[in-house]
Image (cartoon, helix red, strand yellow):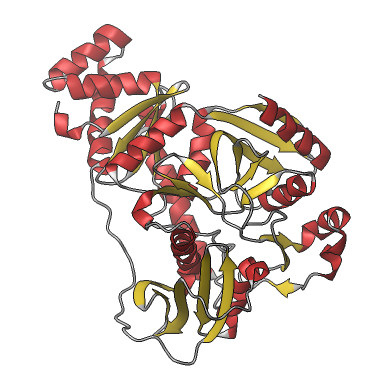
Amino acid sequence: MKIELAPQHSQKIGDNHVLWFESSNSYVVLSTTAYQLLTFYLESDDKHQFTFALQQHLNFTLKQTENCFSELTDFLMAVHKVKSNDVAHDNVENIPDNLVSIHYDFGHAKIRIGYGSEKLIKLIHPYISHLLSNDENQIDAEFAIFTKNGLIHLFKNGESIAHYDFENFHFLQGKFTMELVTSIYKNTVSDWMATFHSSTITNGEEAIMIIGASGSGKSTLSAVLMAKGFDLLADDFSPMLAENQHLYRFPSAISIKTGAFKIIEDLFPNFESYDLQKSISKPTNLKYLPPLSSFHTSNQHFECNKVVLVKYDNNAVNELKVCPSEKILQTLIPDSWISPQEEHSKLFLNWLKNLKFYELNYCDNNFAVSAFKELFKM
Amino acid sequence: MNKKSQDNNITRNEAIKRMGKYAALTAVGTFLILNPQKAQASSPPDPGGDPFN
C-alpha cells in the first residue's frame, strides 16, 4: 500500500515475526498469519486488491477482510506516531556546595559521588557500599545527586545529565547506573545497545539472563545461584554493549527483602549481621548482599544466548521448559531500555534470533540450581 | 493512593480497549505491540511506593 509504512526492521524469531518501527521505537510481535496479513496490506496497491488477496489466499469473508483492513490501517498509524517525551523541565546550573562526598573504587575507575541528602545516600549507597574507597586523591568521574525545585538532579563532571520528579526516581537511578557503567568501561551511552531489567549469571564461559515480573524471585534466585558457585555478572540492571552484544559486569549488591532473609542466612553465614535497612520505596526491610567475585579481577563480559523467565511460587510444580518467544518478549522488551538508534535495533533483533527461551517455575531452590546447571550444559 | 488506583484502572481499561481494537488481528494469532522504556531504569517502586513520600 505505502512502502513508507513498512517496518524498518523485521526478523523471524521462533514461530513469530518481530518488527521494529523507528518513529515510535515499537517492537511488534506477529504470528505467521498476522505477518502475512500485514505483508498483503503493504504489498497491495489499494483496498480492493488487499480484500481480494485475503479472500483468495486465506478464505476470509468480506466482513473479516473489512475489519482487517481498518485495523491494519489504525495499527500502522499508531506505530508511526512519534511519542512525546514527557520529561519534567528545570534549569539548574549550579551544584550545591553542601553535598556529602563518598569515594568508590571500581577498578580502573575511581568515582566520587556527592549526595544532597541522607535519603539519597540511603537510596543509592547500599548498592555500591562494598566498593567504598579511602583513596580520595584519584578521581576519574564525579557525580552529584541532589534535590532542588521539587526535582532530583544528576550531574556528572559538573554537567547536568538528567532530572526527574520524585515518582520517577527509578529512572534517575537507571540513568545514574548507565553513566557509572560508561565511566567504568571508558565509553559513552551511545556505545550501549540496551540495559535489560534482568539479573545475569555466568559459569565463566557464557552468561544466562534471568527475567521475571516484580516479585517473581529474581534477586533471591541470583543470591542462591551465587552461593552455589555461579558468578553474578549483574543484578537488576544488565548492560549490553553494541559492538559485541555481550553483557557486561555491573557490581551492584543484591537487595534482599525480609521474606528471603532465612534462605539467604542459611547460605551466607554472615548475612545475619548485615545492616538492616527499612526500604524507602517498598513496604519491607532490606539487606544488601554484595557480589562474591572481585570486580577488579573477574572477566568483565560474556556472550549470552539463553534467557530464562523465572517465577517462584510456594505452590508451583517444579519445571524447566522451553518457552514461546512471545512470552519472553512480553516481559523483556517493556521492562528494558533498548537504544532507539536504528543500527542498535537491528543488532537487538539479530541477537534475539539466536537466543534460546526458557521458563522456570519452582518452589524448591535446589531444583532451580539444578535447572541452571542443566541450562549451562545445553 | 486514590489517584494511583485510578491511574492503574485507566491503564487496565486502555489495555482492554487496545486488545478489542485489534480483535480481527489478534484472532489470527499473536499480535503484540511492545514499547521499551524511554530511558534506562532500575526496578520501579511498588504501586504507591514513591520513595520520597
The image quadrant of residue A22 is top left
Identity of the residue drawn at 70% across and 61% down: A290
Identity of the residue drawn at 20% across and 17% down: A51
A147 on left or right of A322:
left
Quadrant (top left, top right, bottom left, bottom right) of the N terminus of chain B:
bottom right
Query: In the image, is residue A378 above or below residue A113?
Result: above
The image quadrant of residue A280 is bottom right
Residue A318's x, y, as percent? 77, 33
Which residue occupies the extreme front position in the image?
A137
Query: In the image, is residue A2 above or below residue A97?
Result: above
**Closer to the camera, A83 or A173?**
A173
Which residue occupies the extreme top position in the image?
A56
Residue B50's x, y, as percent? 54, 71
Identity of the residue drawn at 28% across and 26% down: A68
Residue A42's x, y, as percent? 20, 24
Identity of the residue drawn at 68% across and 42% down: A311
**Closer to the camera, A55 or A339?**
A339
B22 on left or right of A111:
left
